[in-house]
């Protein structure tokens, strides 16, 4: 079977880069060839997101927002600009974020502002002064709100599309509670959301850590974060959630009248899933040497239809394909019929590179037998089935694809953790692409010296202690030799 | 029937302000009492949007984006910041927008940027340099893209939540075509979208104008805009769409290889529905003296259930209500069961003020008869029906409510237009809350003097010529007495 005779002007798109051996090149090239982001925008670290990534990120927002709303969070939207005096109210917070802030001091043709405005690097200092007005009594609590927006940080590290940019897309959820225990429960609920959505819906497995005191959110009590593993063996932080204690409540005067009629400080948490970063991790983890493999749930097109015909069979094949398209669309499936004048071979390569989970091929014989051929992008396996079973078969295939992609990703976690009781053992583990589990003196501030030494000598970072599994305590701190109080994980990281 | 005996601490919310006689107060109060926006944020003109408005605005985005996507527009997202050198490339455009721009010249602790960055007031100058790279041949056209974002303009006029803010929510669609005719067709399609969504889905009637040359988008050829009528008799601009000609293509070098193998300039349009402004107009137009009346299609809660019980009937009534809630939710209806310990009377007032389209009341007698009582917020009429017909009845009621709200809004357009052949007649029309149809010399730049004089003497603005109806040409220009070349409309405006 062949396509039409006239040759279009575009040459074949054959993506073929070893993801395992040359991940940085794979990543840059797929961003370019699949038209995900364009790094040629003329402000350093700021990158336009193109339709193929934006459509998936919009679906990712939908999944996260639906889950948040089910758990009682309501959407809101605060201004992008924060007055300097707000930003400086919480001492540790201002110290942590000020070096990264973009400042507005002027409007129009040189009119000076009375007070400088920051582009939000995160919104605690915008939102909590208003929470101080909104929270009055125990009846108002819990107050669970979130916003979907972009935030701005002048990163010093080199930027990469999606993974690290100076403006990124996220959801930030900000919550107020009557007790510290309620706040801690929220932190655990946030981690559940991460597992349900990031792992469950997007197929990205995570390990959950309590971060060290020197690596926590500036101004908070404790940070809990989910890390996943990138193809180059480095870990990357996906959503983190912060137990703010009553630190911000004291700085911003967020108080409530309790049932005993006393005004007391409230307890707060915040949670910040960065959609653009999760997207970057998602394409890295699921992709293969032929290009993207996007999970069915978040694929812009879940199915692409490629008609296969000769001149004299064109009309009937196109009609058959439009019928398939209509049936799938009516069933709520995101489907695209590629009716351009490229050859079928060109279309096969192109949509494989773009990562569409299911390709339907239909030609004269399929039409006669009332069948369709479906190819799974994850396994590249073809199957043929009756047209009548189309509506049922496709979502089922989609589910199987997502389960398979997730299981492939999870298999990379097997044997990943290696116990290391010395600096040398950590170095060995890291150079073999592993993560080291290490006896450590303390993740309180006093332990920072030992953490820094591990970093200097091995290139690995202390990611904190696991809270999703129990780690029996054995040995002495690999640096200072004091009795270990915790088992920490050391990994190279983004 | 009564609620529980213990009295909660919140006093009755009884909203009662005449919208017709005191619209500014009505508007400010409803924004506050219904918790739509909070003007106490400490940057002038920047207002947090609260859940009750945000939930509706998200639904409004969904309707608009679905319609755009159906018509072949794909989502994308550009950076918020635009380099100064981009902004200055189109001369009229920079002159029009620079006075309103917020400038970033510094990051962190005083580090100067090499080039100043503007917060986007609109994104032509961010997007078109990239279009210049993306558009190569006639095969790439039409290119139809949009983004959902906020934009920033340092308004000199006084701001009001939603209607005029220094940061507002919108969609901007930017499109490239091979011919000027294709671009003009897009402008007409944009006006169709406005009618289908803003009028069809949100119930806001509009008149469509071609703006005068002195009131068009800076840098474009022509602006076409939809105006609606506010309760105070002023008109307000809802979406506008711009025929950019090839002006921006020449400034930003957007060229393509045509089928004759020549590089030629492309033709462009842009369309900018401001969701927050449409929301402000929507609540103003549909509200009544008791508060909001939100259309069923875009109501955060389409149905609120108020249980009515005495102590001994509480359990069975609550169970009955939860059953109703579950049935509706399963049917995809946005439903809220108010199970707080306020009295039914308190809940009735509260949810009427919040504008929930349908209230279901259920007490012991309804339970025994397996019935529910539904109240329509638009007419305040009650009806009772069998529980078994719930799933069918509610969406039907919702449709009737939306049709009624739209028809009430449309009735304000009746008799609104008055012919005026002199300045005095314009003054009379405007002081009676009407819009004047006026013979006018020309809407080309030469007519600006006459337009300014009308404004100075009557307080009304020339909104342009109608493109949705034919206006027979009669008389001479009301200012200069030259033969009229157009019939223009004069109205007081936002």
Image: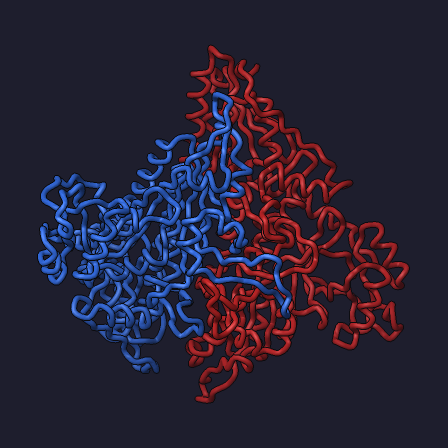
Chain colours: A red, B blue
- Left or right: residue A470 versus residue B132 is right
Quadrant including the N terminus of chain A? top right
Q: Nearer the viewer, residue B338 or A291?
A: A291
Q: Position of residue B54 (x, y in %)?
A: 39, 61
- Left or right: residue B390 versus residue B143 is left
Q: Position of residue A425 (x, y in %)?
A: 89, 58
Q: Measuring 67% from the left and 42% from the top, which residue is drawn there?
A: A28
Quadrant including the C terminus of chain A? bottom right
- Left or right: residue B26 versus residue A325 is left
Q: Nearer the viewer, residue A174 or A6?
A: A6
Q: Position of residue B8 (x, y in %)?
A: 34, 81
Q: Is residue A94 visible?
A: yes
Q: Nearer the viewer, residue B307 or B433?
A: B433
Q: Measuring 67% from the left and 55% from the top, which residue is drawn there?
A: A206
Is A189 located above or below residue B190 in the figure?
A: below
Is B424 located above or below residue A141 in the figure?
A: above
Q: Position of residue A313 (x, y in %)?
A: 47, 13
- Left or right: residue A428 versus residue B282 is right
Figure quadrant of residue A156: bottom right
Total marks shown come to 0
Which residue ends up furthest to the top in the rendered image?
A: A312
Q: Measuring 23% from the left and 53% from the top, which residue is drawn there?
A: B449
Q: Is residue A72 visible?
A: no
């Amino acid at each position: 079977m062949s396509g039409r005779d006239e040759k279009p002007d575009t040459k074949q798109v054959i993506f073929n880069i070893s993801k395992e051996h040359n991940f940085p090149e794979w990543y840059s090239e797929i961003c370019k060839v699949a038209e995900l982001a364009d790094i040629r925008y003329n402000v350093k670290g700021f990158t336009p997101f193109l339709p193929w990534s934006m459509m998936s990120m919009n679906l990712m927002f939908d999944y996260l927002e639906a889950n948040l709303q089910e758990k009682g969070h309501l959407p809101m939207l605060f201004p992008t600009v924060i007055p300097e005096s707000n930003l400086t109210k919480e001492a540790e917070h201002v110290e942590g974020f000020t070096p990264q802030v973009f400042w507005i001091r002027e409007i129009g043709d040189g009119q000076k502002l009375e007070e400088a405005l920051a582009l939000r690097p995160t919104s605690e200092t915008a939102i909590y002064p208003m929470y101080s007005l909104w929270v009055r009594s125990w009846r108002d609590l819990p107050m669970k709100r979130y916003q979907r927006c972009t935030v701005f940080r002048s990163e010093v590290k080199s930027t990469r599309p999606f993974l690290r940019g100076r403006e990124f897309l996220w959801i930030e959820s900000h919550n107020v509670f009557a007790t510290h225990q309620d706040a801690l429960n929220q932190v655990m609920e946030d981690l559940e959301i991460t597992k349900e959505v990031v792992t469950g819906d997007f197929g990205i497995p995570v390990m959950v850590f309590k971060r060290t005191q020197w690596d926590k959110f500036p101004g908070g009590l404790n940070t809990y974060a989910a890390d996943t593993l990138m193809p180059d063996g480095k870990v990357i932080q996906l959503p983190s959630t912060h137990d703010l204690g009553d630190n911000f409540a004291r700085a911003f005067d967020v108080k409530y009248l309790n049932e005993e009629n006393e005004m007391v400080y409230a307890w707060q948490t915040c949670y910040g899933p960065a959609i653009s970063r999760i997207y970057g991790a998602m394409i890295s983890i699921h992709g293969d040497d032929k290009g993207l493999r996007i999970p069915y749930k978040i694929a812009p097109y879940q199915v692409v239809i490629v008609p296969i015909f000769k001149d004299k069979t064109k009309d009937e094949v196109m009609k058959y394909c439009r019928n398939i398209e209509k049936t799938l669309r009516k069933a709520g499936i995101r489907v695209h019929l590629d009716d351009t004048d490229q050859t079928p071979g060109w279309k096969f390569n192109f949509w494989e590179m773009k990562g569409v989970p299911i390709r339907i091929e239909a030609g004269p014989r399929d039409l006669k037998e009332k069948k369709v051929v479906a190819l799974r992008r994850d396994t590249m396996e073809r199957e043929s089935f009756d047209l009548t079973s189309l509506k049922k078969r496709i979502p089922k295939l989609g589910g199987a694809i997502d389960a398979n992609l997730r299981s492939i990703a999870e298999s990379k976690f097997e044997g990943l953790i290696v116990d290391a009781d010395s600096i040398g053992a950590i170095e060995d583990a890291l150079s073999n692409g592993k993560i080291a589990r290490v006896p450590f003196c303390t993740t309180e501030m006093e332990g920072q010296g030992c953490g820094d030494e591990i970093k200097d000598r091995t290139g690995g970072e202390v990611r904190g202690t696991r809270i999703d599994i129990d780690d029996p305590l054995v040995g002495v701190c690999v640096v200072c030799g004091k009795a270990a109080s915790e088992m920490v994980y050391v990994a190279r990281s983004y």
